[in-house]
Structures are given as C-alpha cells and as structure tokens.
Image (cartoon, coloured by chain):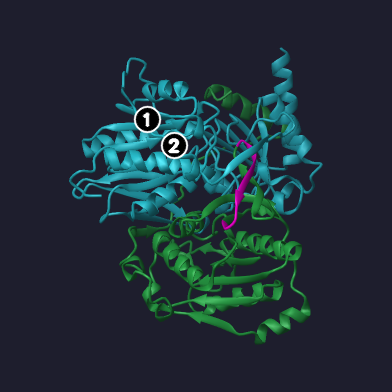
Amino acid sequence: MNIVVCIKQVPDTTEIKIDPIKNTLIRTGVPSIMNPFDKNALETGLQLKDNYGGKVTVISMGPAQAQAVLREALSMGADKAYLVTDRAFGGSDTYATSYILSQAIKKLGPFDVILGGKQAIDGDTGQTAPSIAEHLNAVRLTHILDVKVSGDKIIARRQVEEGTEVIETSLPVLCTATKESNKPRYATIKRKIASLKAEISIITLADLPHADTTKMGLKGSPTKVRKTFTPQRTANGVTIEGSSPAEIAETLLNKLVEAKIL
Amino acid sequence: MSFETCKDVWVLIECFRGQPKNVGLELLGQGRKLAESLQQELCAVIIAKDVDEAVKASGLYGADKVYVVKGEEYENYSADAYGYAFLELCRKYQPNTILVGATVNGRDLGSKIAVSLRTGLTADCTALSVDEKTGDVVWERPAFGGNLYAQILCSETRPQMGTCRPGAFKKPEPVPDNRPKLIYEDIKTPAAAIRTRVIEFIEACEDNDIRIDEAEVIVSGGRAMKSGENFVLLKELADVLGGTVGCSRAAVDAGWMPQSKQVGQTGSTVSPKLYVACGISGAVQHVAGMSESDTIVAINKDETAPIFEVADYCIVGDLFEIIPALTKELRARNQS
C-alpha cells in the first residue's frame, strides 16, 4: 500500500502570548511543532503500513525550516520525506496550497491513501485536505477514527457531530485524522539518530512542469488578507464577594435571578 | 462565474434526519444583513431526503427564496452527491455569496464547492460585513487560537464563500408571516457518481447527557479541578441547573474528561445562556470557544486569571467551597 501523509509545521499556539502594551503577537521564542492532528494522520498511515505493508511518504509545504517536522516524521517511522518549497508558493491561501500539494502528490504517486490532520492549529481552517481531494478528484473522508482495508474496498469510521458513520468506499481515498483517531507513537532513539542524517528531497516549481502557475502563491489565491489585529479585551464584570462561600453563592444566585438568567 | 450575473446571498440549511441544524438558521440572520447591504435576496438552500421541516424553518427565519433539492440519495451526507446538487444549483442560479455552517460536513462541502468553482472560501468567520464600495464581504476570523484576528476578502472571484461556526451567531427573530418563494429543483445525482456509502450510523451516546454544543447551561472545569473524580461536583451543579459539564483542554490532556466535552479552539464552540467556568484560567484557546455565551460566571483563586476579563460575574475564591455552596443553595431554592 502506497501512503502519503501531508504534515504542516505550525507555531505552538498554546505558547503564543500577547504583548500587553503593544497588543501584538509575540512570535519570537514560540516553538515550532508538527501540527498535532497531522501527527495523528501520520500514526494512521504508519498503522496502515504495519497492518497491510507498504510505504509511508511524508510531504510538507513550507520554508526550509519545515524540514524539522519531516525529520520528526522519519523518526516516527516514515520511509521518505519531501519538502515542497519555492518562492512562487509563498502567500498561498488554502486554495493555492491545496493545489500545489495536489500537484506534488500527483508527481510522487499514485497513492492508495492520502492522509492529513483534520485542521492545523495555526490557521484552523480544515479546508486544505478536502481541497486537495477535490483537485485530485479523489474520494475524501474527513474526521476519520480508523480505516480498515479489504481488497480494494475500505471501511472507515467517520466522526460527525451526531455520532459515528461507518462508511464503505474504495481506494484511492483521502482521509483526515482527529485527536481521537489514535495515540501517535514515539520515535525510537535509533530512528531519531538516523533521521538526522536522512535525505529530505526538495520539490520546487521546476519539478512540477505540468502545474498551472496561475493557481499558486499570492497571485493564485482567491482570498487575501485585508488586515490583521489582536482582539481587545475589556474587563467589565461584576465581582461577587462575601464573608463565606454560602454568602457568595447566595449573592450570585440573587444576581442571576435579578438579571433573569435563572 | 462573472460579477455581473452573480447575485443573491445563499445560506446552506444543513439537515440531520430531516431536522435543520441551528447553524443554518443562525446564518439566515447574517445572510439577511449581507443581503440588505448588497441589495440582493436571501436564499436558503436545502439538500436532503426529508425537506419539509427545513423549508418551514427557512421561511420562519426570513429567507426570500428557498431552493430545494430532494432525493433518496441525499439521505446521508456525501461530498459527491451534495456537491453534485449544490454545483448544479450554482451553475443555474449563480449566487454572489454563500454561507455554510462550519460543521464537519459543512467544511467538507464548502471546500468542494470553492475548489470546483475556483473561488475563495474563508473558514470559521465570527463577524461578517460588506465593503459598500466594492460589494466584497469582509470575512473576519480568528487565527492562532484566537490570539489574532484577520479580515479576509475574496475580491476577484464570485461567488464569495465562508463558513461560520455553530453558535457564533444568534438565530434571528422569527418572521411568522414570511412566505418565501419555493423553488424545487429536480436534480438527481447519478448513482455511479456517489463513491461512498454509509453502511451504519452509531449515535453519540454520552450517558444521556446533553451535548455541549446544544446545552443551555454549561458548568466547565479546568486544570484546578485537580482530578477527574472532582468533576462530580460540577455534574451536581449542572444537574440542578438543567445543564451539562464541559471542560478545558487541560482537563482532557490530563485524562480527566473525554474530548467530546472540551470547549475551545480544538474542541467545541458553545454559546449557552449560562457558562460557569470553574478553575479555568482563560487561555485564548478556551475563550475562543465560549466567549459568545450570554452570561459567563468565573470562579478562580487567581484574581489575575484572564478568564475574569470575559466574565460577567467574577468570584475570586476556592471552587471546592463555592461550587458545593451554589449547589446546596440552588437545591434549597428548588424545594421551596
């Protein structure tokens, strides 16, 4: 089975702080990590390989430093890693990003299974993976808990708000993984050391001669950022005080009844 | 699609087993606002097997027109069938703006439509307006876990599209005497074009609990709960209030609560009438998921906790004393 996993390097959003005076994002010193949901996608891919044999390729689009997450993926068990990088790809929105990744996947494929996280924790759109499927005209199943293969059929469990769907479809398929899909494995020391020396192949625009350059980068992106700002917060809550917990409870409940909340 | 021919604001009314989901009705309120600015009509789009309830609700919440695609093949969501039907409608009626709920299926369908029409889709919008000069919708959305907000434009292609999270907006006031124009479109997706099949559906069961995205009262706990067992205190309070228990990411990461109960950026976005945050510091990731609640009560030992910045009622104190006191007082009041 030929498997490709799309992974993204993201800033650890739990570590981002706001400069209280300038009210701007403090980006320096924020660690870059593999998008957590992509780690679940990688684990899904590695389990498919464990169960059915095959090869797991990881691919990431981003600047040179994104190689770090590719090496991490190799240390977890991926077989081959590709960095998709070119100045022409910069400023891409989800449409352009998904198009570029779809072209890279086409070049490296064909694949039986394409995997990605359900969303990235920086942009939080959840759009890129299903859009890749659309560019490739592939079957897509988002928010997958697990995937079982029998012959050329697959059975997957898909999580939606109201419950879990059991879906039958055929390969090839694109799936996105969630936190509940699995618990990603740890890297072994041996693999970690090997990954430091492993070769990361680079895919640039020149490697995609058949791709439509009008669908790439800032120019190829239908959406543009008009402006960004940090949200202003103003505290205007009422403080409830009292000499005992019982008194505080009583005061709060009186206020809630007064305001017709209870 | 061309700027000249594309008109009207469309809202997808997503259904589950014949019932319209709230998010579609919430978006009719936003769609009305945009339609007025653009001086265009507000249209509901329904694709389902059983459409009657959704048609009724679309009228009640103010749609001028309702496009209805009905068929057996639309019983369960599939990107193939829903995409086929939605794209047929787009080609025939050429919308200017499309709003879709940011549900699991809505995000999926939105991506499919946007890529097929080669247009822009902005995810998870929390505020919508129109740039009157250009007619572009200004899509405002959080990023980096709510640390940063961005305004996004899709100014070179139509339709312009966005998804909005359930609960991000309130349902508009009902308009009982509204009689929208109903347009039934007989669109059949060929069986061969539908590549997936739902062979079983397992309902989410949460011990008869109310789902947090539908609860009117949520009592939520964070890191300061110290253990999973201590959430019983919150459950007791939630029970007397007729609500349910939620939690922050810290409580899920610690293994105290299941992820289905998580409120925040990587969990659910909620907007209950009352949200009681217990021992939750108020990291932006959490606040992003609950700040739209009608009333927020925060209980925290640390008076500098950022949760107090969004709370309507602030209690600086020990939740292990205050929560039982609240439960006791409420029980006493309920009995008298």
Residue A164 magenta: yes
The three-letter amino acid code for the residue at tag 1 is: Asp
Q: Residue at horizontal 52%, vertical 38%?
A: B77
Quarter residue A9 falls in: bottom right
Tell me the tag on residue B186.
1
**Side of B294 where A77 appears, left or right:** right
Residue with the mark numbered 2:
B169
Task: Indicate the position of residue A18 as horizontal and vertical percent values.
Answer: 50, 62
Q: Which chain is green?
A: A
**Residue visible at 75% across and 69% down?**
A186
Q: Which residue is depicted at the point 60% across and 31% down?
A: B215
> In front: B230, or B94?
B94
In this orientation, which residue lies closer to the viewer: A184 or A135?
A: A135
Q: Identify the mark nearer the N-term, 2 or 1.
A: 2
Q: Nearer the viewer, residue A91 or A198?
A: A198
**Taking A73 as reference, is B270 above or below it?**
above
Is the magenta region chiefly helix, strand or loop?
Answer: strand
Residue A81 position (above or below residue A231) = below
Which numbered tag is attached to residue B318? Answer: none
Q: Label 2 is placed on what type of residue?
A: Phe
For label 1, the crowd category at 10 Å Cα-Cα, with few meaning under 14, some 14 to 19 and many 20 or more, is: few
Q: Is residue A196 visible?
A: yes
